[in-house]
């Protein structure tokens, strides 16, 4: 919606992806269950970018990120979840 904020948005998007990746690949290392089955998110981009307007917005967003370097996180992916993982798993 706001291509000029692409560099800010990429951090939010990566945090959400990293939190999901925690429950797909790494949770068991912290004693938490793996909640996302392998292959579940394979078609996620197809669902998110399912119209011409969304595809165009994504291309503009991607262009705004050109020239940047965006590395993966150091440490636990769990810290990127914007909710209390331990509390959620107890409920």
Image (cartoon, rainbow, N blue to C red):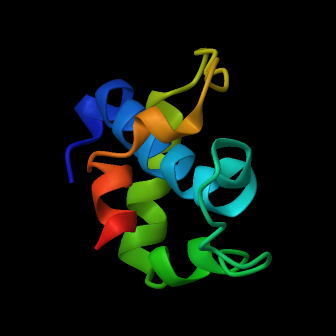
Check the image and report above or below for 30 versus 34.
above
Check the image and report above or below for 26 versus 20.
above
Q: Nearer the viewer, residue 11 or 37?
A: 37
- Looking at the image, which residue is at 75% across and 55% down? 25
Residue 31 vs residue 8: left or right?
right
Check the image and report above or below for 14 versus 34.
above
Can you name the residue that lies furthest to the left here? 2
Q: Nearer the viewer, residue 79 or 57?
A: 79
- Looking at the image, which residue is at 49% across and 74% down? 49
Can you name the residue that lies furthest to the right here? 38
Residue 23 vs residue 47: left or right?
right
Residue 40 on image: x %, y %: 68, 81
Residue 66 on image: x %, y %: 57, 24
Picture quadrant of residue 33: bottom right
Q: How many marks?
A: 0
Residue 4 on image: x %, y %: 25, 31
Q: Quadrant of the C terminus?
A: bottom left
Q: Quadrant of the N terminus?
A: bottom left
- Looking at the image, which residue is at 63% across and 21% down? 75
Residue 6 vs residue 76: left or right?
left
- Looking at the image, which residue is at 32% across and 37% down? 9
Picture quadrant of residue 42: bottom right
């Amino acid at each position: 919606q706001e291509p000029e904020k692409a560099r800010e948005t990429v951090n939010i998007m990566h945090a959400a992806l990293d939190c999901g990746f925690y429950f797909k690949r790494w949770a068991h290392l912290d004693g938490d269950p793996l909640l996302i089955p392998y292959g579940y998110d394979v078609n996620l981009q197809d669902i998110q970018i399912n119209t011409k307007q969304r595809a165009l917005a994504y291309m503009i967003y991607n262009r705004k990120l050109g020239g940047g370097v965006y590395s993966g996180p150091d440490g636990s992916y769990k810290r990127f979840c914007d909710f209390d993982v331990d509390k959620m798993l107890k409920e």
